[in-house]
Amino acid sequence: MNPDRRLFLGNAALTIAAAHLGPFLTAEAADREPRELAAIGRATEWLNSPRLTAANLLGKVVLVDFCTYTCINWLRTLPYVRAWSQKYTQGLVLIGVHTPEFPFEKNVDNVRRVLRELRVEFPIVIDNDYAIWRAFRNQYWPALYFVDTRGRVREHQFGEGEYARSEQVIQRLLSEAGVARTNGTVSVEGAGFEVAADWTNLRSPETYLGYERTQNFVSRGGADEGRRRVYSAPARMALNAWALAGEWTVGGQVIALNGAQGRIVYRFHARDVHLVMGPLRPASAVPFRVTIDGQPPGSAHGLDVDEGGNGTVAEQRLYQLIRQPKPIVDRTFAIEFLEAGVEAFAFTFG
C-alpha cells in the first residue's frame, strides 16, 4: 500500500489523489492492549505533551487525527479539531499523529515551527516511521479515528467534511463513558489556509510534480528523469496541464531549479492555488513573482504574495499563491523564480 495519499471530499469531490512498551508493562499486558493505542504508546517523540502511553489512554475517549503539515485538506479541518480540543476538556484526549508525506516534514523543528504558527496546542506525536499509520491501517490525510474507553476504534472520518457527525460521535462516546453530555455542535469559520474549499468551483486536482506520480506534464519532450535540462512551456495548454520553463531537474518526488528565471505554468480552475516548495539550502531565500493570465494578481493574490505578485521562498512549507474572487473560470497561473535554488513538490487547490 502506498501511504502517500490524500483524500478530497466535498460537493465537487476530485479523484483521490517494534520498540518496547516500556519497563512497567509486562508482555501479558502488552498482549491485552489494543494494537492502535499500543503503537501510539510506543512512540517516543511528542510535541505539546509528555509521552502518552497506552495505559494513559485506556479509560478515556481518544480522538486520533492523522496529519501532515503541508496538507491543505488537513489545514481546512483544523478549525473544527482545534475547537473540539477546547470544548471537550473533560474526558476527551485529542492526539494529532504527524505522519510526513514529504522528506522535509520529518524535520521535527519544521513541525514544531508550523504548529506554533497554527496555534495547535493539543498533543502531537511524531510518526516518522509510519508505525502508528500502519497500526491503524490508515491511508489518508486527514483521517479521524474515534476510540472508546476500551481502546476500540468505533468510528472514522476520512477527508474533509461531516463535522457535525464527527462531533456527535465524540458526544456519544463521552456519554457512554459517563461524561455529562454537551448538546449542540461547534460553529467555526476558518481564516487563511483554513478557509473551506470552494467545492462548487473546484475543477483542478492535486498535482505532484516529481516524475513518479505526476500527470498532464506538457513541456516538449516530457520529463527527463533525474537529469538537468532546459524546458520550455507551450503558449497554449489544456485545463489542468502544467509545464516548466528554464533549467530544471525533475526527480522522483521533487523538481529543482538549477538556474535563474525558471518558471512553472499551470492551467487551472479553482479559487485557490497552493504550492508545496522550499529553498534547497537551509537559511536561504529565493524571490519569485506570480502572474495570472500574464498579469500581476492584484486582488487575487494569496497569503504569500503581494498584489504585484511578489513573494519569497524561505521555508519548506505550503505557500498560498492565489485566492481569487468570483467569477472562477479557467485561468493560467505562472510562478517565476528569480534565482536558482528552489525545489517544488505539489500543487493543491481550493
Image: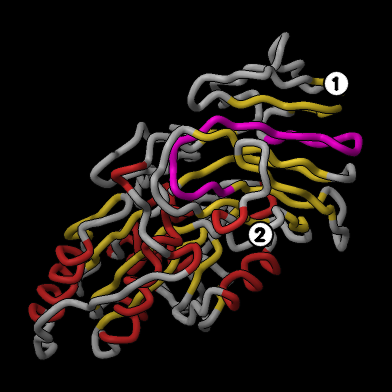
Dot 2: element: loop
- Residue 310: percent from the left, percent from the top? 75, 56
- Residue 265: percent from the left, percent from the top? 66, 32
Dot 1: element: strand
Q: Is residue 26 visible?
A: no
138 relative to 42, above or below: above
- Observer-nearest of 76 and 266: 266
State yes or no: residue 130 in magenta.
no
247 to the left or right of 107: right
- Residue 287: percent from the left, percent from the top? 82, 53
287 to the left or right of 164: right
Task: Tell me the crowding category of disc 1: few under 14, some 14 to 19, or many 20 or more residues within 10 angstroms, Cα based.
Answer: some
* Secondary structure mostly seen in the magenta stretch: strand
* Residue 307 numbered mark, or none: 2
53 relative to 193, above or below: below
Q: Mark 2 or mark 1, which is nearer the start of the sequence?
A: 1
* Residue 230 numbered mark, or none: 1
Region rendered in magenta: 254-274
Q: Residue at x 35, y 43 (%)?
A: 8
* Colour mapping used in the image: secondary structure
Q: CA distance from mark 1 to mark 2?
A: 30 Å
State yes or no: residue 256 in magenta.
yes
Q: Within the image, what quadrant is residue 211 found in?
A: top right
* Residue 321 numbered mark, or none: none
